[in-house]
Image: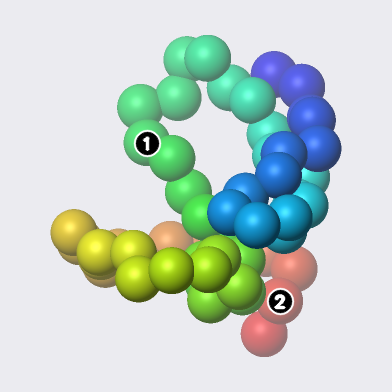
Amino acid sequence: MFRINATLGDGLVVQAVIDTAAEVTLVSDRVFKKIPGDLPVLEQVSVMTAGRD
């Protein structure tokens, strides 16, 4: 597992964690809201994490 800088859409740069054994891909709500365009939400899942609120 390692981290890279990834560019999304028209120049939004985020730090991404690459985990080749992951079964799901997670995107924070803050990053999702910044992605340009109209992205479909196929399923919304709440994940308990540490570090915010």
Q: Residues within 10 Å of mark 1 (few under 14, many from 20)?
A: few
Where is 36 relative to 10, above or below? below
Distance (Cα) linking label 2 and label 1: 21 Å
Q: Can the viewer see residue 25 in this picture?
A: yes
Q: Position of residue 34 (x, y in %)?
A: 60, 73
The amino acid marked with disc number 2 is Arg
Tell whether label 1 touches label 2 (CB within 8 Å).
no
Query: Is 6 in front, or is 43?
Result: 6
Q: Secondary structure at mark 2?
A: loop
Q: Position of residue 2 (x, y in %)?
A: 76, 22
Residue 21 horizontal/vertical position (percent): 47, 15
Which residue is at the front of the view, 11 or 25?
11
Q: Residue at x 61, y 66 (%)?
A: 31
The count of marks equals: 2
User: Circle 2 sits on which residue?
Assistant: 52
Q: Quadrant of residue 3?
A: top right
Looking at the image, can residue 49 be seen?
A: no
- In the depicted structure, whether residue 29 falls above or below residue 3: below
Quick one: quadrant of the C terminus? bottom right
Residue under the point 75% across and 68% down: 51
* Left or right of residue 10, residue 29 in this image: left
- Percent position (x, y) of residue 37? 43, 69
Q: Mark 2 or mark 1, which has the lower sequence index?
A: 1
From the image, tell me which residue sits under label 1: 24
Q: Residues within 10 Å of mark 2 (few under 14, many from 20)?
A: few
Q: Mark 2 or 1, which is nearer the eye?
A: 1
Give the amino acid at mark 1.
Answer: Val
What residue is rendered at 81% in x and 37% in y?
Answer: 5
Image quadrant containing the N terminus: top right
37 w.r.t. 10: above or below? below
Q: Residue at x 65, y 57 (%)?
A: 10
